Each structure stands twice: as C-alpha cells, then as structure tokens.
Image (tube, rainbow, N blue to C red):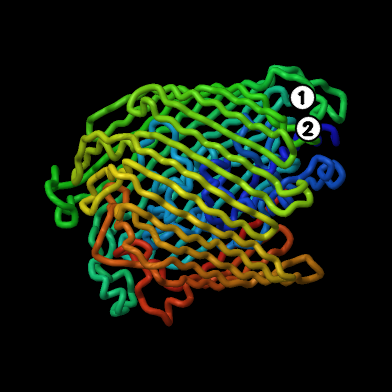
Amino acid sequence: MAKLFHYLFPIALTCSSATVSAQQPVIITPDTIIKTSPVSTTQTQDQTRSNKIRLDSIKKHRDSTRVFFFNNDFESIGSLNLHANDTAIAGFQNYDPLFKHDRFYATLGNIGQNYRSLSPFTSLIPVGFDYGIHSFDQYLYRNDSVKYYKVEKTYTELTYVQGAKKEQNFQAIFSRNIYRSLNLGFDFRVRSAPGAYSRQRTNHINFVLTTQYFTKNKRYGVIANFTVNRLRNYENGGIKYDSLFEENLETNRQVIPVNLTTAQNRIKDLGFYMKHYFNLSRHRSGSRDTITDDATRFDLGRITYSFNYNRQVQNYIDTPADSAFYPPPVIDTTGTYDSLTVTRYINEVIWSNPSFNPQKRLRILRLEAGIRQQYFEVSMTGQKHSFIQFVPHAAIDFNPFPSLRLEAKGDYVLGDHNEADLSLRVRLTTILGRANRNAGVIALTGYYSLQQPGWFYSHYHGNYYQWDTTWQKQGFITAGFSYSWKFIEAGFNISRINNYVYLDSLSTPRQWTNQFGHLFLYTNIRLNIGRFKITAQLAYQSVQGTTVLRIPAFMGNLSFYYSQPLFKGAATLQPGLNFLYNTSYYADAYNPSLRSYYLQDRREIGNYPYMDIFINLKIQRARFFVTYTHFNASFMSHDYYSTPDYPMQDGAFKFGIAWRFHD
C-alpha cells in the first residue's frame, strides 16, 4: 500500500509551480502573463512549503483524511501536480468567487453581477478565436479551474453562507474512489442574492461532474468533466437619482428609482472536456525508485490528447423595450430578446518530455510541441458564422542549473478571423543562492502578442446596438521584473499597446491607432509576527499617451489577523480587520444590453476606504466566520461606488460555515 501511495502522489517541486489558497485574495502580478497560474512569487514560496508535500513525508506521515487536488496540466509535469486542499481559516470570510481571485475589481454592488478588472494587461490573452466579453468568467466553472481530487476516504465538504438582504450561498464538494484509481466527484454551487436595490437580484447554479482514471504504472491516464452553468442576473441600469443615495434621503434602498424595470441577462453554459495521456516509454515496475530511474534515462516522451465541447447561450431580455434608456434607433420598441450562441469544438494533440524528476526537480531540457484544431459557431439574430482554425505551438524549458530556469512558449494561428495571430512568452528565473538557503528569487518576463480583437467588437446585432466593422490587429509588448524573498515580493511591468479597441462614450467600438504605455508596479506582503499576521497587496499604475484607458492610479488591500489557539489547540479563533482602497478616477460605466463597460466623462468615483471586521473560527473539521462588512458606511459619506450609478453594498452582517466529512 505504501508503494501504491508513492505512485499516486508524486509532486513536481519546481520553483514556479504554486497553488493559491482558495480563500486568500491576492493581486495578479505582471508575471501572470508568463506563469501557468495567477499567483505572486512570495505566495509561491509560502504555498510550496505548506501545500506541496514531498514523497518522503507522505510515506512517513500518511494521513488518510488529507485531501489533494490537481488540475489539467499533464504536458509539462511527468506526474500529477498535487496541491493540498485548503483548510485554513485565514481569508475564509472572502467567500465571493471574485474575491478569491483578487480584490481589485469594479462591480455593480451585488455578488454575482458583472465585473471589470482594475489591473488590465496582467492576465493571459486567449489565443485564437475569442468572442471578447469576459465580465462573468469568474462565476463559471471552466476547464482550467476544475479540481480533480485525490482521496483515500470518501470526501465531502458542505459550505453555507448567509449575507445581507436574504443572500444565500451553498456549495457541496464530493469525491470518492469507485475502484482502485477510478475516482468520481462533483462540485455543486447555488447562489441567490436579491440585492439592496430594486431588480438587483442574481441567481446562479454551477455544477461540475469529474472523473479520473490512471493505470497502476501511470503509463496511461484520463480525466474528464461535465460542466453546467446557469446565470440569471436582473438588470436595473443603475439608480436614477444619485442624490437620494448620496444624501441618504431614503434609507430603504428598494424604493429608490432605477433606470430599467424589466431587463434581465441570462447565461446558459454547457460543456464537456476529456484529456488522455500515454507515455511512449514503458515504466519499469517493482522498485521503489522507479520514477527516479525513469526520469534519468532516455524516454520517448508523452502524447496528450484533449477534446473540449462548449455551448454558451447569452440572452438579454427587456420587455417592453426601454427606448428612453438606450439611444436610438431601436429596431423593435415592443420588446427586446437579444440572443447569442457561441459553440466550440476543440481538439488538441501535444507531445512532450515531462519535466518531473524527484532528485533534480527538472530535466535540463524539456520540449513540447502540439497543434490545436478549433471549430467555432457564432449565432445571433438569425445570422450564423463558423470558423475553423489550427493553432500550432512549441515550448521549451531549459534548466541547466538548479538555480536557473528559462521558459519560452510560442503560438501561431492559421484559419478564419484570427489568421496570423501570434504570441510569444518568455520567463527567466534565477535563485540567488541555493534552493533551501538563498537571498530571494529574481524573475524576468517578456510577452509579445499580435491578435485580432474579439468578435464582439467587429460584429454585433441587437435591438439597441448594431455594427459590422473591421479592425487592425492589436499589439502588446510587455517586459516585467520581480523579486521575492521570504515575506515580500515586489516588481514592475511595462507594456506598450497599439491599435487598442474599446467602447466609447456612446457604447460604440473604436480603435486607438496610436501607441500608448502602461506601467504597473506592485508589492505583496505576507508577514507573521508571533500570532499576528499581516497581508497586503499594493499596486501603482499609470497610462501614458491616451485617455481611452482609465484605471485608478493606486490600489491597496490590507488585512490584519490575530490567531488565538483554544482548548489546547483543538480550535483556533482568528479576529481581524480588512481595508480596501483605490484612488479616484473616471471609471467606465456599465451597459447592461452589451454586458460591457464603456467610457464616461461626467463624474469621478473612488477615493473611499472599505473597512471590514471579522472573526474566523476553526474547530477540528469545521470552519466558521462572522463578519460585518463595510462597517464605516454608517459614519462616512455616501459616495461609495466602484461603477457609476451602482452604489456598493451598505454595511452588513454575514456569516458562514464549512464542514468536512471523511467516510
């Protein structure tokens, strides 16, 4: 059994692989465009020590109740890149899926509504066809974020959170070994949040069914998932009279007039994903050091094949049509039913020589090559467009010394709409000293991309807006530097953008044909002082050469925790404070029918601190929290917006519980 466990839980201990605590908000650093996961290097070091479990420690200190998970990264890692499931209480009160990613977003004042990132150009731009709207992605289960659990016992976790104004959230996670290495699991999430204002309700249902199977010698493996996402958001177009809110003339927010009275946005998303791998070289069996022996001898590499099907339907409903809120011309004044369907079929084949080696951590040279075949259909208001694309890619991972690593990857698109799109990502990492004793880690990153703007910006036909146009390809050149050591990480990112496409003040697509620059500096801190813990994410950014990109100059998120063991360590009490702030700027306004944000010049928002107080408690396998969010709303001015005309939530009590079961 120990030998079987040894094979089931191999972990690639690389300096760049990391897991983000599911409840800990972090800022996306510029390295996101190069890394495989959006985490800071400081967090990489902390999580590597706490979450990545060495093979030796697993064999010596096995705990049958410990739960691990992995994602779908089969190409670069020879074995499953396992992460310990998060059971910490630090940050447990941040239950919003958006805040689990990071806190720097503009929202509409209620959980589950559309959002906009306040730190652009820090996430990877999709390669190949892209519809162009991603203002709800964090509320969908997607392939890259699906977790496949490794358990010894049947694992179940139930979470319930109740917020203000009858907001309710429930999540159930289940994983069970059916037979040997055949596992079946699911993740089910439901949310209902009526909101403080009229027609601010959100109702979400998310479900993912997962399965996995690996042969005894790990030569063949397969994972699969089936996802269902249903999002239903009521749209009120913002409040009509800001003075009623800002002067606090009406404390009952439900009676404040809003701009839209019948509008809804609905999204139905259905998908299936399957991924196989097969090692071309046979693994020897019967030895405890099989993995080590195989990694040091020549092998023929690994073939990976994946298939992905996804169908997403977006509907905007407004009956009767609100011609007073939207500009003319309106095609149908009796009612609006804008329907969009995007269907994807994606096949991908990859050859790689995986990098895993428990003693050397990485191969000196890892190669990867593959090709992705994509078929897309876009249907809207009776018009249907189809595309076939081929996207070859190649990657190299050069690790001549334990302290030096060079990674590079390039893509090129052949086919409709995105013909000749390309991207190149490079990352050089060096450890200043030894891996276990050093003066920090330095990373240099580079990114170049030439890509066609999203389909949405070229072709759209709805009841209120219609356009057909063509744009030049957008160009992005980015260079970044980061330094991390122990509890701190700092860095900067410099980008040059040309042919940037955006929505102007009339919600119409425009292209800024001149070049402009974007500077992004950040500092992440995770400091433990006795029983006190301080986490901070600070960022400064500047745009030079244009006024069509508007973002706050400074953003900060600061948390203070104090941990107090109780009952001889059987429980932990953790009170704390959280502060969120960004400087004032002309924030983009929101257009419900387009599910997008556009420029506005009538008012500045920001320069307002949000303060939360919370108490987290952990008793064996149960976690609890009680929080009073935005408690300063009762004694500060009423000008708290992150999107014009959409006030943020007032002060509110919330509580939640998560309970794990192993049987």
Residue 652 appears in view: no
Number of numbered callouts drawn: 2
Question: Are the residues flagged by discs 1 and 2 in contact, CB closer than 8 Å?
Answer: yes
Image coords of residue 332 (percent x, y): 14, 44
Q: Position of residue 337 (x, y in %)?
A: 23, 43
Q: Residues within 10 Å of mark 2 (few under 14, many from 20)?
A: some
Left or right: residue 147 compared with residue 78: left
Mark 1 or mark 2: whose residue is earlier in sequence: 2
Q: Is residue 308 left or right of residue 472?
A: right
Could you say which is closer to the camera, residue 488 or residue 592?
488
Q: Which residue is mark 2?
A: 7
Instruction: Find disc 1 in the rendering and name its residue.
Output: 217
Q: Which element type, helix, strand or loop, lies under badge 2?
A: helix
Nearest the eye: 93 or 662: 93
Q: CA distance from mark 1 to mark 2?
A: 8 Å
- Which secondary structure, mark 1? loop
User: Can residue 88 be spotted in the picture?
Assistant: yes
Kind of residue at badge 1: Asn
